[in-house]
Image (tube, rainbow, N blue to C red):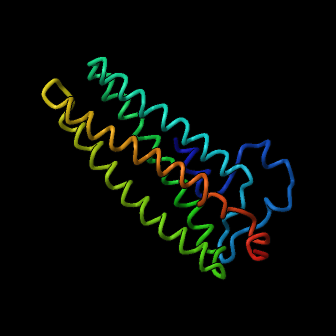
Amino acid sequence: MFGFIRNVFTGRREASNERSGSSAQSEVAPGTEIRFDPNLIDRFTGQHVELVEEIHRVKKFLIAKNYSATIESLRTFKVMIQQHLLEENLRFYTYLTHCLINDSEGRELMNDMRIEMGEIGRLLTRFIKHYLEFGINDLNAEIFESELTGIMHALADRIDREEKSLYTLYMPPSAISRR
C-alpha cells in the first residue's frame, strides 16, 4: 500500500515502463514534476474493471445473505476506490490542470467531471461508512440493496463517460499544445 502511495507521488511506474525510453515519458506537465505516463489510462481502465467486479461481488454476497462477506467485500471496494481516486486526482487531474491552460473546452470538461467525481466520491464515502459502522442484516438489507443498485448504475455511467471522453484528453504536453 505504501509503495502505491509513494509511486503516485513520485510518478514512478513499473520497471518495464521506465526502460522503454519514450520521449513522451520524459515530458512533464508545465510547472510540475508530474511526468506523462503512457500506461496511466490503461491502468485506470484496468482499475475500473476491478472496481466493477468488486461491487458486483458485494451484491452477490448480499443476495446470498452472507452479510459478513458483504461487509468484507465492501471494505475491499472502499480501499480500491480510495486508491483509484487518489491516483486519479494526483496523476491525472493535476497533470491536466497544468497542461490544458490554453484549451478552454478541454479544461471545462475536465473541471466539470472533476467536480462530479468529487460529489460521487463523497456519496460513496457516506454510503460505505454508514454500512461499515452499522452493518448489514435482514432488517436493512433491502434498503442497502436499493442504494447499492443506484451506486452501481452511477459508477457504470461515470466509468463509461470517463473512458469515452475525459481520458481522451490525456496525452503528452507537446501533443496537447498542438491541439
Q: 71 or 53, which lies in front?
A: 53
**Which residue is at the far left?**
139
Which residue is depicted at the point 79% across and 72% down? 174
Which residue is depicted at the point 80% across and 42% down? 16
**Which residue is at the far bottom?**
102
Q: 84 or 119, which lies in front?
A: 119
From this view, report whether residue 109 is shown above or below residue 19: below
Q: Considering the image in quadrants, where does the C terminus appear?
A: bottom right
Q: Which x, y percent locates residue 63?
A: 30, 22
Which residue is depicted at the point 27% across and 41% down? 147
Q: 6 or 109, which lies in front?
A: 109
Q: 36 or 120, which lies in front?
A: 120
From this view, report whether residue 25 is shown above or below residue 18: below
From this view, report whether residue 135 is shown above or below residue 6: above
Q: Which x, y percent locates residue 106?
A: 61, 72
From this view, report whether residue 86 is shown above or below residue 58: below
Q: Which x, y percent locates residue 107?
A: 58, 74
Horizontal placement of 1 versus 172: left or right? left
Q: Quadrant of residue 136?
A: top left
Q: Quadrant of residue 32?
A: bottom right
Q: How many marks?
A: 0
Q: Which x, y percent locates residue 13?
A: 70, 48
Which residue is depicted at the point 62% across and 50% down? 7
